[in-house]
Image (cartoon, grey):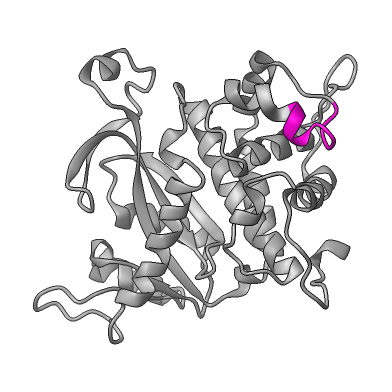
């Protein structure tokens, strides 16, 4: 595919070029659903690209985005759905968005990086007790504790495996109480391979987990804890800061905690859009020779 080839000289990064490149990939690769009646005016590939533009241009809420979308990207998307259709369609496209993240990650050189980083971060869905009682997430969301912010929260936890450049190569959304080590057991077979080195924090300390990964040819590095001697190699602090900065990008520039979801399928879709926006920006930057995690070129329309 032509888009897999890097250019010989860096070119200017802009959101138009990113959206066009992403649309070409998705339109060619995403499965086309057979349905009765006329074809939809807006294809799934167009809708997902429009949602990526929403994230990169800094509009956490659909209402504000759709008021400005025609002015911002109307030259690329001549047909834009109303808020009801936009929200409903995207809520159903969660599986396709997740598939698109893996597709973009596999197209990137980051997929073949032998060093991976793992961490988790809270995804709150309610702030007050009254909201919790009325929440549609009952039975799915849980109360959990965030050690880095010394606070309890109600919601979910995003477990993320990524390359050092920030490319998400594996992730899972679980209840807030799910152990990080158990989540990693589920993610590892999908995105780690023989010869990989995985760097995590002390929350991944488990001799059984290390042995399981080692049997698959994967080395887990994490800080030593007390008298426990793990397979640590020197000071992992600077490497750990990489994934912390990646998660901060998701929270700050890509509004991870301002997702606004009220149902589980909507939450999966909205978290997926933010991960896809990050993956697409990194992939496109690599194609044009720009710094991998430079998202500022995509937060405005030229």
On screen, 27 above or below 233? above
On screen, 106 above or below 57? below
Return the residue found at the far bottom: 234
Q: Residue at x 81, y 26 (%)?
A: 42
Q: Is residue 34 visible?
A: yes
Return the residue found at the far front: 302
**Position of residue 300 measured from the top left corner of the image (x, y, whole percent):** 66, 45
Q: How many marks?
A: 0
Q: Residue at x 41, y 61 (%)?
A: 245
Q: Residue at x 51, y 80 (%)?
A: 195
Q: Is residue 221 visible?
A: no
**Position of residue 6 measured from the top left corner of the image (x, y, whole percent):** 79, 72
**Position of residue 249 measured from the top left corner of the image (x, y, whole percent):** 47, 53
Q: Is residue 72 magenta?
A: yes
The magenta-colored residue range is: 70-78
Q: Is residue 142 magenta?
A: no
Q: Quadrant of the N terminus?
A: bottom right
Q: Residue at x 83, y 21 (%)?
A: 35
Return the residue found at the far left: 227
**Position of residue 66 measured from the top left corner of the image (x, y, whole percent):** 66, 23
């Amino acid at each position: 595919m032509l888009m897999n080839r890097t250019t010989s000289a860096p070119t200017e990064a802009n959101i138009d070029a990113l959206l066009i490149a992403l649309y070409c990939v998705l339109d060619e690769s995403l499965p086309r659903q057979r349905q009765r009646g006329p074809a939809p005016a807006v294809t799934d590939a167009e809708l997902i690209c429009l949602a990526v533009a929403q994230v990169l241009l800094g509009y956490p809420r659909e209402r504000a985005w759709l008021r400005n979308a025609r002015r911002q990207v109307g030259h690329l998307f001549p047909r834009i759905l109303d808020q009801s259709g936009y929200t409903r369609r995207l809520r159903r496209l969660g599986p396709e968005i997740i598939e698109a993240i893996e597709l973009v990650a596999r197209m990137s050189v980051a997929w073949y990086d032998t060093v991976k980083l793992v961490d988790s971060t809270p995804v709150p869905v309610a702030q007050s007790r009254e909201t919790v009682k009325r929440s549609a997430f009952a039975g799915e969301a849980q109360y959990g504790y965030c050690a880095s912010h010394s606070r309890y929260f109600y919601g979910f936890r995003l477990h993320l495996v990524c390359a050092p450049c920030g490319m998400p190569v594996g992730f899972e959304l679980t209840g807030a109480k799910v152990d990080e080590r158990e989540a990693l057991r589920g993610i590892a077979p999908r995105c780690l391979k023989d010869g990989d080195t995985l760097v995590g924090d002390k929350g991944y300390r488990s001799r059984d987990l290390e042995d399981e990964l080692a049997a698959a040819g994967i080395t887990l590095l994490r800080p030593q804890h007390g008298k426990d001697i793990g397979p640590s190699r020197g000071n992992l602090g600077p490497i750990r800061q990489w994934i912390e900065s990646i998660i901060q990008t998701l929270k700050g520039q890509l509004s991870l905690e301002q997702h606004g979801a009220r149902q589980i399928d909507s939450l999966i879709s909205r978290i997926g859009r933010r991960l896809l926006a990050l993956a697409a920006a990194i992939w496109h930057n690599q194609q044009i020779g720009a710094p991998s995690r430079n998202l500022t070129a995509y937060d405005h329309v030229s």
